[in-house]
Image (cartoon, grey):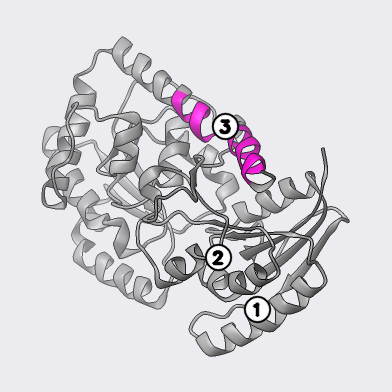
Amino acid sequence: MVRKSIVLVVYALDREDKVFSHQLEIAAFLATKFERVVILAGRVGQYNLPGNVEIINYQWISGQKFRNIVKFLFTYLNAIFRNLDAIIFFHMTDIQAMIGAPISFIFRQKIYLWYAHASLSFALRISSFFVKNIVTSTYGSCPIQSKKTKNIGQSIDEVKFKYFERDSWERLIHYSRFDESKNLHKLVDAALILRNYNPKITLTLIGDPSSKQSFQYKSNFELKYKEHLDEGWLLIQRGLNRDSLPEILLQYDVFLHAFQGSLDKTTIEATLSGLPVITVNREYLNEFGSWQNRKISSGKDSIKFLVLEYINFLSLSTEQKKLQLNLRRNLAINSHSKTHWESTIMEVLTK
């Protein structure tokens, strides 16, 4: 059944964007379910969408707060007055929701917000009063859990991620933004300890900084670990288009991860590819379990926890490894597949 119209508010509409390219996939999906889709995007790049989609660029520029608010407000008002019967869906745009949701609330439009961060932003607090539902991936991926909150998993095309059986566990990878919040130094420190057990272990960090502060963090990081970079076992690579991630993951053996917060999409993608995920992330551990059957007690022992997770995984027999990796892949498909997400989000949006 095709519904009438929806207004989708996103940060970027660009298949080449290394962070927000999936927002284009969501737009393409909604275009098959609604007669008319109006997309308000902060930045517009390369895309291919059908004729029932109208795209409006509200030109969100980092650091220009007042200008962004005014520009978005006028763009939003214009779009809403032309689509008063539309559903409103803010995707990873809590600031925009804080601006636009009160207006749509006055006109009694149904408003939804996708939010997947552990931090409770001021914009989320305000937006939560006006939206019908806050949609997120897992219980711990949104700080507001109420009757309004719907936990529906990630949206990952499991067909793209091929399961590959490995017999070596030496090539460690981490794929994400190159930000301090990702605790990349803990990954290096854990890999250093593991190299005492096996000097063949390597660690590759793939990703780009996302802000001026992150560029400075990367510079300091490279200086701090220059010796290990020169030794060749620690590698840093530029971020790549997310379409290439399935092929990248096939080149590695273990996904190392130290982010404490919401459920990271890359941990699910690694799981789908048959990589053991060695992480301190509570959201992942709550859903998929620990390799050592214990919970991490605090951030202070996260390096030790990572090391023990890796060692305990290695201690499993070949058959046990194969069984556990397959079980985790099946769990990821059941809870985080694109098919599951799409059917569930439509139930939420059209209820």
- Mark 3–mark 2 Cα distance, whole angstroms, equals 34 Å
Q: Which residue is mark 3?
A: 158
Residue at the spot x=16%, y=38% of the render?
307
Residue type, mark 3 in image: Glu
In the depicted view, which residue is nearer to us: 83 or 94? Answer: 83
Q: How many marks?
A: 3
| Secondary structure of the residue carrying numbered label 3 | helix
Give the class, few, some or many, for how many residues have Cα within 10 Å of label 3's Cα (few <14, many ≥20): many
**Which residue does the image show at 53% across and 38% down from the upper left?**
246
Start-end of magenta stretch: 331-348
Left or right: residue 188 versus residue 174 is left
For marks 2 and 1, the one nearer the N-term is: 1
Give the answer, above or below, for where 290 lies relative to 317: below
Q: Which residue is label 1 attached to? A: 59
Q: Quadrant of the C terminus?
A: top right
Choose top left, top right, bottom left or bottom right for residue 309.
Answer: top left
- Judge from the rendering whether residue 301 lies leftward or rightward of residue 274; answer left or right: left
